[in-house]
Amino acid sequence: MTTFAAPLRLRLDGGALVNNWRWLQRRSGTAACGAAIKADGYGTGAVQVMRRLLDAGCRDFFVSSWTEAASLEHLLQDGVNLSVFHGVRVEDMGRALSSKARPVLCTADQIARWKSASGGLCDVMVDTGMNRLGLDRRSDVAAQMSGLSVSTLLSHLASGDEDTDLSTQQLERFSDLRAHVPAGRYSLANSAGICLGQPYAFDLTRPGLALYGGIPRPEASEGIAQVVFPQAQVLQRRFVPSGDSIGYNATHLARTDTEIAVLNLGYADGYLRCFSGRGVVSAGETHLPVVGRVSMDLIAVDVSAMPSVKEGDWLDIDYDLPAASALSGLSQYELLTSLGPRFDRVWF
Ligand SMILES: *Cc1c(COP(=O)(O)O)cnc(C)c1O
């Protein structure tokens, strides 16, 4: 008996995921190391990621919304925390109050809402210079928080992946907050922040990108390994005579007789058109160029160098995140989170 398999799959390296988390944990020093698993674990599958990191000892998880939290609640156990970054809108209150996850309160209105509902344990986000979510650091944060039961006070780095004064300013501002605003724990660093060094770690770090193999700063390349390996199946091998064009709008002209393989992968799967004529696919050790435009569901690869590649074969899509980012102009975050639902996700 055979089970149905899609013609495209993400091979996901569970060992690499756990090793990446352990490396980030070591770099976090005495701080606990959590995990950002929003956007379905950056496209890899949040349930699988949370299971594996729970087994490895991770106790703090972060998602963006209550819908994301609901799909993970069955994995919560004593001593495990799940925080919802975007806090509580009016529409969220029902779910939030009956959830074992807790909100990261970001605005004065959210705080008022949580207090008047006697919502219980929460986290609070303060903005220290990114001007995204969070209370204004220049306001009386401690006064606003009084009456709340705050587990963790958070802030978020805007430019941790660059060498800029903004990170040091945010570090100083957050240290100042810690001195004046009582909370159970303090947390500032994402993946890039962990690479910036121990002073950024405080009590709890919140890596996302690097868990999944992203390299936010050069320091991470020594310890972070690729997790996500896309593969696609060959639907057809064909001969393209010299002078013919390949694909939509005939952007690629075969200058010599060429053999191509047409693969079941396209921009609807997150392999976006910026890989047209730039992407690389591998058959074993041989690197093969993507030729012509990426279609919605298909790409063409020049396999002239590989007479053995045939219909039904699986080829590896080169998806080393820093390299694919340089090639495509997409961020490593976009490369991960755009990978679509048509991939079979296969952990190994
Ligand atoms: C997404 C997110 C993180 C994780 O950031 P990475 O750069 O992926 O490590 C941490 N904190 C907050 C508030 C976030 O939104």
Image: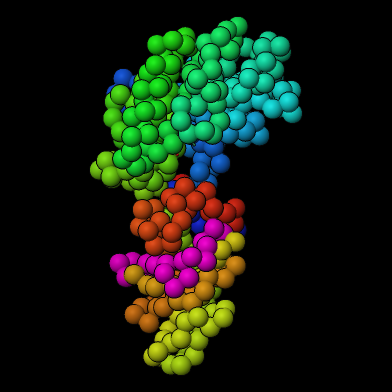
213 or 77, nearer to the observer: 213
Instruction: Give the residue displayed 44% in from the left and 52% down from the top.
Output: 331
Residue 129 visible? The answer is yes
Residue 17 visible? The answer is no
* Residue 254 x/y as whole percent: 43, 87
User: For the N terminus, which image quadrant?
Assistant: bottom right
Q: Which residues are magenta?
A: 269-286
303 or 192, nearer to the observer: 192
232 or 36, nearer to the observer: 36
* Residue 72 x/y as whole percent: 59, 31
Queried whether the magenta region covers residue 67, the answer comes back as no
User: Farthest residue toward the front?
Assistant: 138
Instruction: Give the residue displayed 50% in from the left and 27% down from the top.
Output: 127
Q: Is residue 199 above or below residue 265?
A: above
Queried whether the magenta region covers residue 274, the answer comes back as yes
Q: Is residue 15 above or below residue 91?
A: below
* Residue 52 x/y as whole percent: 45, 34
Name the quadrant containing residue 18.
Answer: top left
* Residue 103 x/y as whole percent: 60, 23
